[in-house]
Amino acid sequence: MLPFQLASRVSVTTAAVAAAAGLALAGVGASAESLAGLQAASHELTRVTEGVYAFRWNAHNALIVVAPEGVVVVDPISEPAARQIAVQIRDIAPGATLRAIVYSHDHADHASGAAALREALASDAPVLAQEAAAPKIRERADPALPPPDITYADRLTLASTERSVELHFLGKSHSDNMSVVLVPEARVAFAVDFIANDRVGYQELPDYHFPDFFETLPRVLDLEFDTIVFGHGPPGDRATVTGQIAYYSDLERAVEQAVEDGLSEDQAAARVELPQYAGWGQYEAWFPGNVRAIHRWVSNR
């Protein structure tokens, strides 16, 4: 039996790397930073449940999954962050091998650091990502962000006797290559940037794809999880996702009304309010930008 199994539409660019890591894969449809930054950064490791940890580096979160087959890291974040992740892995799983590194999406503020993580753990573990991430990463030619060795189209599973790791492409959202990660045995999910815990979207919703985003967001609830860790901020649960769906639905309706009333983008940004979300994170700073982004889309569709 092969040390890894690939189903249709799972791409392996360096099969020898995967084989060396002993991966069992099942698919369906299938900047350099200084060591001074390592010392100055705020970081912490939080146990989510048995074998599943959230690692915070300043305002960014990574996911670490420990299983008998090895450790899977989702989003190394940056080179200094990756070195600290290696320290944490040696602490919580002494002697464990690095099985795989997963990019949630191609953006460098989450995906950088894979080379540093491999070096720190003396590993040649493969990097996994959704297939649309690969050409974008290759084009940048950033040594801190090596391109993925293995890509997938719709779903990929790292099988395990205790804690499997599933990668799901639910559709375009923030980027066209976002992987939502599920650890089914632990009922833990990991979703980055396009969703957060009681927080509005980032500024003017950069690299958001509409209308796909409104279709992708509810699909998160199709996954079987109880706890969901986000790329930024504290974790949440299924109700947190429901709240995000409601926010963006209310935002769309409010901006549609503003456009119907003849308000320009500037006027809408100044006048549209959703007071029921005023207590959410970054509402004062980012909500007007959310309005601007939706106004442009509504006006042009």
Image (cartoon, rainbow, N blue to C red):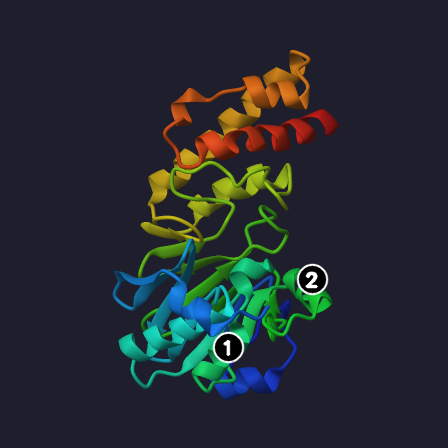
Specify the farthest residue to the top. Answer: 261
- Considering only vertical position in the picture, is 4 above or below 166? below
- Considering only vertical position in the picture, is 137 above or below 196? below
The image position of residue 192, as x and y in percent, is 48, 52
Q: Residue at x 28, y 77 (%)?
A: 91
Q: Nearer the viewer, residue 225 or 179?
A: 179
Amino acid found under the numbered disc labelled 1: Ala
Tell me if 102 is positioned left or right of 208 in this view. left
Q: Earlier in the sequence, mark 2 or mark 1?
A: 1
Q: Residue at x 45, y 31 (%)?
A: 283
Q: Is residue 277 visible?
A: yes
Give the Cα distance between marks 2 and 1: 20 Å
Q: Are marks 2 and 1 in contact (CB under 8 Å)?
A: no
Quarter of the rendering containing residue 289: top right
Where is the C terminus found, in terms of image quarters? Answer: top right
The numbered disc on residue 253 is none
Q: Is residue 67 visible?
A: no
The image position of residue 204, as x and y in percent, is 59, 37
Tell me if 177 is positioned left or right of 283 in this view. right
The residue carrying pointer 1 sits among few (fewer than 14), some (14 to 19) or many (20 or more) residues within 10 Å by Cα, namely many
Amino acid found under the numbered disc labelled 2: Lys
Residue on which the image places disc 1: 116
Q: Residue at x 66, y 23 (%)?
A: 265
The image position of residue 3, as x and y in percent, is 49, 85
Tell me if 188 is positioned left or right of 83 in this view. left
Judged from the image, the secondary structure of the residue bearing numbered disc 1 is helix
Q: Residue at x 48, y 40 (%)?
A: 218
Judged from the image, the secondary structure of the residue bearing numbered disc 2 is helix
Tell me if 36 is positioned left or right of 261 in this view. left
The residue carrying pointer 2 sits among few (fewer than 14), some (14 to 19) or many (20 or more) residues within 10 Å by Cα, namely some
Residue on which the image places disc 2: 136
The image position of residue 247, as x and y in percent, is 46, 30
